[in-house]
Image (spheres, rainbow, N blue to C red):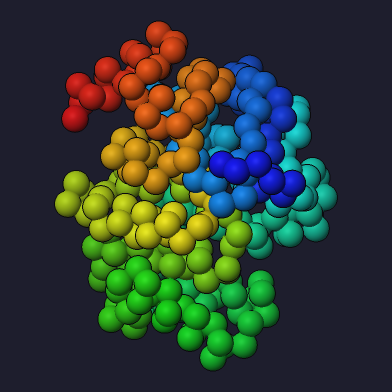
Amino acid sequence: MSETNEAPAILLDRVNKWYGQIHVLRDVSLTVAQRERVVVLGPSGSGKSTMIRCINRLEEHQQGRIVVDGTELTGDLRALDTVRREVGMVFQSFNLFPHLTILENCVLAPIHVRKMPRAEAEELAMGLLKRVRIPEQAKKYPGQLSGGQQQRVAIARALCMRPKIMLFDEPTSALDPEMIKEVLDVMVELAESGMTMVCVTHEMGFARRVADRVVFMDRGEVVESGPPATIFEKPETERLKTFLSQILRGH
């Protein structure tokens, strides 16, 4: 990444989080530059999803600082609203409203949160459904679509808010293998358009192709961080070497 004076898109500074007695994030520090694409890897239970949910304050951290697009996440609800407007999130489960059409799912937030006129919201949504290659599904309901199509709708819906930052929490892990590629293709295109992205995933090919940086987490800590080639070909810690060998065995 070129050195600029731009404020980082995301800053985590010594972030700690507990669930009761369980220490799930341990002094996590991470800076994501504007337009940087970061892929987060790690074994199950390593704190990856918790970290990404803290960035959107779906989970609250107990110690340390999280600053998103210049706004620090505190108990202040106005700050939270500001951040949520700028950050799109795509989950493992698609979280679409089953009783609304695909188009209605997409226009809901722009109309109610951004106060966008309906005609403008619908035009924006149709443009984004074209971008994720399913404009013909606009009048259908989520239950009529495949998992891969529903996840592409979820991406379009997040983009309808015109976010500056996109967070993905294992967006392909609930999908059948043949549907994974269609979702990853959309994410690759998004990455190439210059969107700031943080993506928790096990898709190594995707990480190699789009990530500026790969972050490896284990036991609530950031263990290693670097360009994909360094992380995959020259891992420094035994924890990362073990993780990579298990992933490669599984594929």
Q: Residue at x 42, y 57 (%)?
A: 192
Where is the N terminus found, in terms of image quarters?
Answer: top right
User: Horizontal placement of 138 versus 250: left or right?
Assistant: right
Where is the C terminus found, in terms of image quarters?
Answer: top left
Q: Residue furthest bottom?
A: 119
Q: Residue at x 37, y 72 (%)?
A: 131
Count of number-bearing discs: 0
| Residue 84, image x, y percentages | 66, 57
User: Horizontal placement of 66 versus 156: left or right?
Assistant: right
Query: Can see residue 233?
Result: yes
Q: Residue at x 75, y 27 (%)?
A: 63
| Residue 214, image x, y percentages | 46, 33
**Closer to the camera, 184 or 45?**
184
| Residue 49, image x, y percentages | 50, 36
User: Horizontal placement of 224 versus 57: left or right?
Assistant: left
**Closer to the camera, 154 or 206?**
206
Q: Residue furthest top?
A: 238
Query: Can see residue 18?
Result: no
- The part of the image, by quadrant, that contains residue 11 is top right
- The part of the image, by quadrant, that contains residue 39 is top left
Q: Residue at x 44, y 54 (%)?
A: 191
**Closer to the camera, 23 or 128?**
128
